[in-house]
Image (cartoon, grey):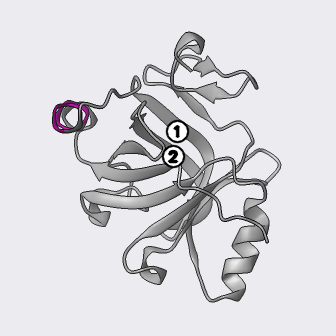
Amino acid sequence: MTSAPLIHHVALLVPNLEEAITRWSTATGYTFSEIARYRTDRYCDRSNPVPHHHDARIAFSKEGPPHIELMEFHGSGTHSAMQGEGFHHLGFLDYPNPEAKLKELAQAGFSEDGMALDADGRILLWFTDKRDLNGMRLEYVSPAGQPIVKDDGSEPYRDERGCAALWPPEQQ
């Protein structure tokens, strides 16, 4: 029997990332990463199924798992203010085969609403539709390198695999 993946993070949508980091740090004592951006030109969701630009500002707690991911409102789709402030998704990091999970859940009647693709059209991450799980999404993130940059657009830190990281190597 294969064990179920563990939740890596709980993600929240916020109107102002800097204010949210301050408030969550004060309330929890957690330390958050520098602000980064999940930046890609190959994001699709119900608001626009054609791959388009996506530039979401994010920060993760160093404490965890599960970590807290704070995401600032962005665009008109899955990360927009129309989605409402607060809970956005439970995230599973380094999911070994997100394409297979998408097919498996589709056969069980689940929909997707949000997907980032690499240059070859492979899934980097995808979200279930919140209507399928009591207003909650699940996010399946592949082990492939993610399109993360620092908030100013510069190159990110790198982990031991060479993938983008939110912390300097000495803090990983």
Q: Classify residue 81 by image quadrant.
A: bottom left
> Of 48 and 136, which appears nearest the observer?
136
Q: Earlier in the sequence, mark 1 or mark 2?
A: 1
Question: In the image, is residue 155 part of the stretch drawn in magenta?
Answer: no
The residue mark sitting in front, 1 or 2, is 1
As drawn, 156 above or below 60: above
| Numbered disc 1: secondary structure | strand
Report the residue marked by disc 2. 54
- Marks 1/2 in contact by CB < 8 Å: the verdict is yes
Q: Residue at x 36, y 28 (%)?
A: 32
The picture places residue 157, in percent across and down from the top left corner, at 59, 18
Q: Which residues are magenta?
A: 21-27
| Numbered disc 2: secondary structure | strand
Quadrant where the image shows the N terminus: bottom right
Q: Residues within 10 Å of mark 1 (few under 14, many from 20)?
A: some
> Of 24 and 147, which appears nearest the observer?
24
Q: Residue at x 60, y 41 (%)?
A: 40
Q: Amino acid at mark 2?
A: His
> Of 92 and 80, which appears nearest the observer?
92
As drawn, 131 above or below 1: below
Outermost residue toward the right in this view: 120
> Of 3 and 140, which appears nearest the observer?
3
| Residue 116 in sight here | no
Q: Which mark is residue 38?
A: 1
Q: Classify residue 108 by image quadrant.
A: bottom right
The picture places residue 28, in percent across and down from the top left corner, at 23, 37
Instruction: Examine the residues drawn in magenta and state their main secondary structure.
Output: helix
Q: How many numbered badges does the structure rendering display?
A: 2
Outermost residue toward the top in this view: 170
The picture places residue 20, in percent across and down from the top left corner, at 22, 38
Q: Residue at x 47, y 59 (%)?
A: 90
The picture places residue 118, in percent across and down from the top left corner, at 74, 46
